Image (cartoon, grey):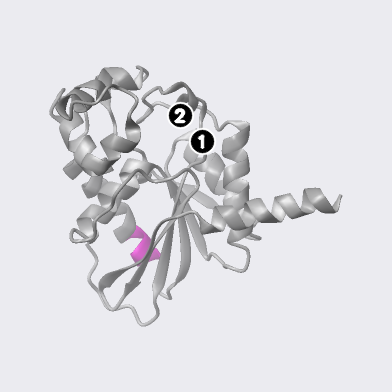
Amino acid sequence: MNTGDSMKPLFIYFVRHGQTVFNVEEVVQGHNDSPLTALGRYQASCTGIGLRGTVFNAAYSGDLERQYDTGRLVLQCSGNGDIKLQQYPYFREMCYGVFQGRHYIDMLNPLFESINTPYGGFEILEQHFTATEISQRVALMDPSVETVEQVRERMLKGIDMIIEQNPEGGNVLISTSSVAIDDTFGALFPEFYRGGLIHNASICIIRYQDGKFHLEKYNDISYRMAGERFFSSSDTAE
């Protein structure tokens, strides 16, 4: 990682993509893709509204459609629509290999069985494992699955690139996916417990300053909720 001094803080805003068709159908995505649902587009738009007043000097996205579309909606609705959204494979979701395109149950049922819980008890599963811990166990099931270490390596390379491209600090956006975010934060902040899965269109923020990373926000849906209130009040006014 880049450890050079930064005179001004660089705030890195991570946004998870909005709800997708595969999210609804409980189909494993990974490097596969599916479009945002109407709700997913609304979620991304709401988060963008919640970020109004935040000026982004650069924006990045994984090269998956759901990530790019979310990033564009966030930029447009936050008043940053003129910012180019740069796509890089660094910021893809974790690759789930043979499980991609298959139902969640094929991949997750062994984990449910390990805690004596019927498939579908996701809240119970999240009480036992972080997203990274789930990924670590899935990677042991088949060699085609990307390891947590591999995800972290490419994500951190991408972050290093962003730091080098933004020496004057400011705010940058990364539109990516849940496990990619969780794995990255696990690498940078190993002592921070990350319970539960990252919500659609939630925001996580890292501050990079003087060669160090600082955790500012994690899995924060307040921006999305602010946008929901905005749209709700607009509908009421009509």
Decide whether residue 40 is among the magenta residues: no
| Quadrant in the picture for residue 8 | bottom left
Image disc number at residue 19:
1
Q: Nearer the viewer, residue 139 or 199?
A: 199
**Secondary element at image label 2:** helix
Q: In this image, 119 relative to 24: left or right?
A: left
Quarter of the image with the N terminus in it: bottom left
CB under 8 Å between discs 1 and 2: yes
Q: Nearer the viewer, residue 95 or 186?
A: 186
In the rendered structure, which segment of residues is drawn in magenta? 161-165
Residue 80 visible: yes
Q: In this image, 196 relative to 236: left or right?
A: left
**Secondary element at image label 1:** loop
Q: Nearer the viewer, residue 48 or 69?
A: 48
Image location (x, y in percent) of residue 44: 57, 46
| Quadrant in the picture for residue 7 | bottom left
Q: Residue type at mark 2?
A: Asn
Q: Residue at x 29, y 40 (%)?
A: 126
Q: Nearer the viewer, residue 199 or 153?
A: 199
Q: Mark 2 = which residue?
A: 23
Considering only vertical position in the picture, is 217 above or below 182? below
Image location (x, y in percent) of residue 31: 36, 30
Residue 76 visible: no
Q: In this image, 89 relative to 140: left or right?
A: right
Image location (x, y in percent) of residue 75: 59, 54
Q: Residue at x 22, y 33 (%)?
A: 146
Number of marks: 2
